[in-house]
Image: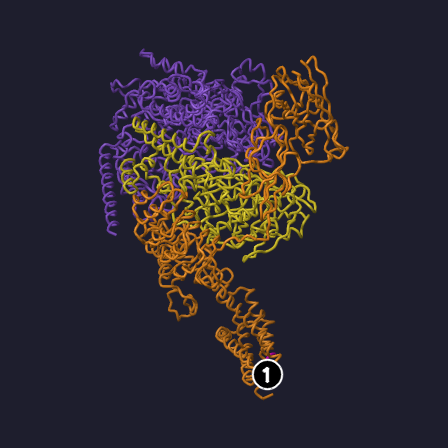
Chain colours: A purple, B yellow, C orange
Amino acid sequence: MAAQGKVNWLTLSVIFASVGTVALIAFLLTQKSPAAASMPKTVDYNFHIRPILSDRCFKCHGPDARQRKANLRLDTEEGLYAALKDNPSEHVFVAGDPGKSEAFRRIASQDTSVLMPPPSSNLKLSQHEIDLIEKWIAQGAVYKKHWAFVPPQETTVPKSGSDWVVNEIDEFVLAQLDNVDLEPNEEADRERLLKRVYLDLIGLPPTLEQQDAFLADQSDNAYEKVVDALLANKHYGEKMAIQWLDVARYADTHGYQDDGLRTMWPWRDWVIHAFNENYPYDKFVRWQLAGDLMPDPNKEMLLATGFNRNHKITQEGGVIDEEYRIEYVTDRTNTFGKAFLALTFECAKCHDHKYDPISQKEYFSTFAFFNQVAEKGYQGDIYSGTAADVPRISIKKEDIEGILDFVNKKDSGLLNVMIMRDSNVFRPTHLLSRGAYDAPAEVVPMGTPDRILGFDTTQFSKNRLGLANWVLDETNPLTSRVFVNRTWEQLFGRGIVKTSGDFGMQGELPSHPELLDWLAVDFVKNGWDIKRLIKQIVMSGTYRQSSVVSKEKLARDPENIYLSHAPRIRLTAELSRDLVLASSGELTEEIGGPSVKPYQPKGIWEVATSGRGLTRYNQDHDDKLYRRGLYTFIKRTVPPPSLLVFDASNRDQCEVRRLRTNTPLQALVMMNDPQVNEAARVLAESLINDEDKIEKAFRLIICRKASNKEIDILSKYFEEEKKTFTSNVADADKLISIGEFKHQKIEDKAGLAAMIEVIMTIYNMEEAIVKS
Amino acid sequence: MNPFLENKLNVNRRHFLGKLSLGIGSAALGSLLIPDLFSSSGDDQALAAGLPHFAPKAKRIIYLHQNGAPSQLESFDYKPLLNKMAGQELPESIRNGQRLTGMTSDQKKFPLVGSYFKFAQYGKSGAWISELFPHLASVVDDLCIIKTLHTEAINHDPALTFMQTGAQQGNRPSMGAWLSYGLGSDNKNLPAFCVLLSRGKGNGQGVYSKLWTNGFLDSIHQGVQFSSSEEPVLYLNDPSGITKEGRRKMLDKLSELNSMGYEEFGDPEIQTKVQQYEMAYRMQTSVPEITDLSKEPDHIIKMYGPDCLMPGTYAANVLLARKLSESGVRFVQIYHQGWDQHGNLVGEMPMQARDTDRASAALITDLKQRGLLDETLVVWGGEFGRTNYCQGDLSKENYGRDHHPRCYTVLMAGGGIKPGIVYGETDDFGYNIVKDPVHINDFHATILNRMGLDHEKLTFKHLGRRYRLTDVGGKIVPAILA
Amino acid sequence: MSKFQKVVGNILFGLNALLLFFLLFDSRMEYPAWVQSVGRMHPLLLHLPIGGVLFVFVLLFFKNKFQDIINGVLGLSAVLAAVTAIMGIVLSKEGGYNEDTLNAHRLSGAILSFVLAATYFVSTNRKVLNITTGVSFVLLLVAGHYGSVLTHGDDFVFGPLISSEEHKIVVTDSTSLFAAAIKPVFDTKCTSCHNDKKSKGGLVLSTREGIAKGGEHKPLLTPSSPHGSLLMKRILLPEEHEDHMPPKGKAQLSASEVQLLFQWILSGADTAKAWTRYSPSDSVRKLAEQVIRTNSKTSMGPHYTFEAASEETIERLNDPYLTVRPVALGEPALAATFFIKNEYKPSKLQALSAINQQLVELNLSKMPVTDEDCEVIRKFDNLEKLNLNFSSITEKGLQTLSSLPELRSLSIAGTSIKDLNALKDFKKLKEVFIWNTPAIFVDGDFPQLVFNTGFIPDEKEKLRLTPPIPSSDKTLLDKDEPIVLTHKLPGTVIRYTTDGSDPDSTSAKVYDAPFTIDGYTIVKTRACKDGWFCSPVGTFILYTKGVHPLETKLFTQPNKDYKGEGPATLSNDKKGFTDDHRDIAWIGFRENPMSAGFKFEKGADIKNITLSFDHNTYGWLFPPAKVEIWGGTDEAHLSLIKQLKPEQPKGLQATRNEALVIPLEKEARGFETYKIVAWPLPELPKWHPSNNPKTKDKRAWLFVDEIIFSQ
């Protein structure tokens, strides 16, 4: 018992100690922590107040008229200062007087009977938020239009005079860092910088030669030379395409039930082509949205419109045609909203949007643009259905030799691709009550959300081309911001607006609003030049700084919102695969073509199939086994597991931002996927007789010279394993026989097996598939 | 609580606090440091804890989905009137504007047809069960038979998606993913949400991985496909030539190297990664022990039926499901294809029943005898019902039935559900519900409730909106709660 | 027959005549007010005849005794019954009753009266008397039941037996206070008289509408003014007062319920407002919460009062193989589960002592827990549920555990425990799981316990084993690749043949080690074990790889839909699946014969050629009608060296991947070039179901996936 007592005392004291330290840390941090914590000097409606109101109040007091309680709305200026319905002498907010502001009294109340939001809503405000609102009222309760709905203004670049600064981007970033009293990191070491920029621009690691060349090049513009080379590299288009394929929900099957084959890959080849040719973003968008409606469109412009046919198409017998046709148009409308405007259109289909100024009527006005396609909801079941439903184009030999020379078509067979074409007869669009296909209400005209940017029919034609021009109009507050932000996200792992898919009221606020606007304006001013934008960013000191993160920075800015260091980001599913194949020398560098079926655990398709359509996974062979990840065949109902495990999109819907998780299953894939093990074998075979085989392997995969300690560990490991395998040749035989890639005759089997294990270990190092 | 939840790479604030890992302290610290962390309603904390909102009745779920929609009229919803009126037209007053699938919409006549199979009453509740399900009939006193589930969807894909994710369209998280998100897994060496697939001899309709998708939740909540074959989990087995010791050694070298990386970069995710590899290794060692059938005594094999010795069969999967559930897996989802009898119902349904009846009943008995039934919720059912009229040619010996959304039967057992009752009534035509309808949202709400979760509180904010499994609906069904 | 009897007899006759009259013409009659009050004596009077009849019923058990008393009592009861019945009919005119129930009551009551009268007249004859009294006793019950339904509502008698789920409701934060707390009061205390079936005073309290509507003296509620509300007025009247509700004799409202209703009306009598939206300080909410606690089956599970353990302690205890977590958010109670046998250590169990107060559930299933460990477990004072399935504990350990004060559920399935006597000493134990133990007990030994003995296999039931399966699903094996047969059920004997014959369960070769085959082989297997029927025969058609030709050519065009991978299809080591003809492993011929050329190195010594095809009679896929083998130095110089007409199936057969093995004689072995020509069957056999006048094109198909050349 006494012993017990002691133990308890021990634990107690430990607890006290720890709590103490926490309190201390907390204290210290608040003294020096980012602006975030302390109450801002001036409370801004856009940045401090609306996010709260939107998240906690708009559901019942927002844009949605039908849901609006007590006829009170907080999303408009009028609404904020309005008198109460049942007591006109009282007002919602009274500038300068929190006590008189009914809304404030309600949210601050202790009495749950009057408290807002009501407990039953499962929503509540933190004390900090209440204080913010109080202070805002005290300061005059000034209303501002939602930042994202105000066209970006040219912002003046701060001048710091710091020599850390390379270009304008750094000025903005540095200014923010100063605000929160953080220092940027110095430039990353050359090897890491090289790997970073290679992975970001072409998605492949630098070869030994490329590494050596860069290390040797002492000229000041050595880095810039690399950047320019990469932007001109044919793999640049592939890297850029991956993200766009998510946005465009590209896949190789139709997606519902029997999930038959579709041939949209020529469209995918076009995307790669467009990026490689550096089509300006406006052209890129205009062609995809309305290539078919432009004056005498050529086949390439038609092919581009395939963007809007990438949605799922049903082949389930017995579906109701109209139900699914509406489903497709809905998908296009939602995709349009998310892809180009970063708005959650889908929330306005069944009722007015609860947070953003998109009424149900406006939803269907936009819907109307995509409602004209000469298509059917149900083209036929898996047997009568086709790989490309009408409207479609046939790609002929002369096209391949001519205007569509980028389409990687090998066989002579017929090749059809789905495209957009409006029917000759105008289809009036009804508002659908509850969004139900069989509940049409009044007819609505073509249009767009008015409070974001009205659709001026004197300026824009009433068809998709008009819509495309509306999107690209310089007064459109969203388009350029959205794309610039997404590009930024690609390179830094986190957008200036974190919610890159939602610029609405519920979205997060830009961490660097001025920078975002400056980039957006600059981007348009320079002719929507994508390569230029990317160069601008990767040249910046912000991008080039090292990714080392100090305890203090980690504690003060765990999400690295303020970019006091470069991010460390795990590669996407496709790029992880690419890194393995490229470093081992297996990679097939071919661009485009029909999607391929690499190794996949057996039985995955077979067990899920209805017995119709693509029932069996017929794995490919030879160089098709070693194509880049973006060419892996995506059967929507059974996406490739190894990619899915690494957070790849299942291409069910438009997706602008992937999650980034770290799971045991990923570890299993890296350790046991035959693709990785085979790569280790192939690389081992090519290095086994090399003096410094381990150093080379390490450099090929990690893209830097290994430290002595690292070499020690690995060489020791090699020797040990070699011993084990020498005493057990059977295992060695098994290990070295993995994979279909051509085997080289190696005498020293034990050595080879040991080397394979060493390389597998390097592949599984955290740093291997991480951009740091 | 559960590493599967904790060790996520995407460093979010909650995660960061998790690292500091001191509940009360962190709240204070957190709100000082990042004001808007705790502002967004209670659900975040609920997740952080990965705990039920209130004391649960059920800890785990085994969901036996009968994919393709077994006919309620040949199984658990006895309608003698249909036999009396066989061949006569379905009265318009009964159909009452129900939309039809393209498969029967152009059919001239809708002749009623009664069950070819005999029914008898069983158990305390005197429930009517057809001769196709003798084993389920023998455990009827443990079953709660709900005759009045109903849906809006009339086609498999949307109906299945609705049943599993609470929405007909859209890439929403499935029930299992929600539970993984809300509760995590008890066994830290196994995923919280496992999926098992099998196919019967009847007309199949396919299954789609979106049925066990994590949707907008972290992919950690994605259903992990298990199989009763030699590789129970994808990529679980070491490459041939690598021994357990070899693998262990490699992991040790790996953590040595990675810890060097941590010293250089100070990125906590590096440590997380090391933990992930350790967990993967533990999976490699523990899963085979769990999935090994050879330890099962003869009479257990007898109980589930010899089919359970054939990898990939329904019986084998149900037995595996019990073993996974017993080992703490929160949600085991089984899909068994082949229940889509548009025609040749008399030929196919007995085969489907033979493949599933014995094992389904065995599962309930087996859980019960281990004292696990009261904390394990078992569900058996399809995605919608089948029409009371014949699709295609009606003969004395054979007929078919089309999809019917207005009513279908689902069985529940254990996990705080009242045993030995029949809930809800359909009309004598087996076409409309006359008493106690249960919408899919209600069904989900009730299941979450048994798991200790308030379906209105289990939310996730995605692109500006807080999503729920029950979307905007869902009423708990009190009468079936034990 | 005494004078008394005569008189009584006449009275009886008169009364029953009157009763009959009332019964028939009741609907047409009007009563003066004074009669009404007479009618209201029905409930009072009815008890007398009941008593009487019961008394007689008892007396009848004494053979041939008390005849006089019986006569007297019978007469009196009969008279009273008639009077009561008449009064009842009068009373029924006041209305507010459910018609059907009322009629049933009226009728049964009347008949009872008649029968009693009859009984009185025959009372001298014991035999008849016994019967009629029996009958009237039954009638008594029937009438009584309907009466009770009228006054006390449905299931007044059996209600307690029928579970009261209807009153229970699930409360979430958004449930209205009305539904959560007020309605339950109405449901238990008021709706028996004020429901849609029976609405005394036209008032229905079972629905929101009814409450809003009020009754004859509407309105029922005046929001915010309890004293102004009829509901409270009636409730607050002294119980003696005739307008007091619930009426005297019915279940009365408890003080707190009165308070609750009062406060609810005071707060505005809102039927929609969620209970959480009332201020916690609000007394109506305070009162409501009490009701919710008692009624609700969810939200608020068990509430434990003991101290919570610190998070540090909990985190310290958790490890990959031991999970310790609270049973719910904000609950101090903890549940612990151990995983993976080899990772279990007694010390880990010992460590749980740190939470010996908080631990309510402990799952040690499959862990090697010993009796010593039970000494640790017994210290978990609040342990309610303990799972020791398949652990190593014995009677001794069981005895140790018996001191657990709170234990309710215990699982010891799969243990060696035989003697259960220790169970007697458990205080709160309710359920025990002893499946798969040698334990035996006699019913009644443990009255307070529920045992689950689990599934007992039916010894008579014999099931058929499944056939053994090869460990790999490869059908095209490397040379000398071993074939491994497995069966998941331990202890099965596997027998097999390689000559195509069915292995019988006694003489066929027993599989004891992996074996190899040479070329195309049909392996047949069968598994047997005592207590099971032997498995059906499993058939596996296997091939071994041969020499690869340097070059493969096709001289004829395959069908355009089934080109496979061109000529390569025939020698790419890819076998096709019989159910998937679109699989590129297959190459299909119908219009043309298959004519293929194969080139080998000099001196390639081909001993036989295996032509592997899809045998699918249902799908019109048949063996070739004719095959020719040509050999020579090159394409230009080939000579026919062999030709054969394979046997055709005589009827529909199971689909399978089959082969034709064509041995080459010495002189035919040395060639560098071989040509193989195979003709599809020109017409489906007569017996084929599809061979009927309706079918235009009757040509069969030839599907080949591989041609193997073995040395």
Q: A286 or B182: which is nearer to us?
A: B182
Percent across and percent down for residue A130 are: 29, 40
Whether residue C132 is in magenta: the answer is no
Q: Is A657 on the left or on the right of C48, as rendered?
A: left
For residue A340, side relative to residue A4 (left or right): right
- The one of A51 and A593 positioned closer to us in this rendering: A593
**Residue C91 visible, this orientation:** yes
Displayed quadrant of residue C689: top right
The range drawn in magenta is C118-125
How would you classify the magenta stretch by its main secondary structure? Answer: helix
Q: Chain of mark 1?
A: C
Write down the residue under mark 1. C9
| Outermost residue, bottom side | C3
Q: Residue at x 52, y 71 (%)?
A: C91
* Residue A49: percent from left, percent from top: 32, 35
The residue at 61%/71% (across/down) is C24
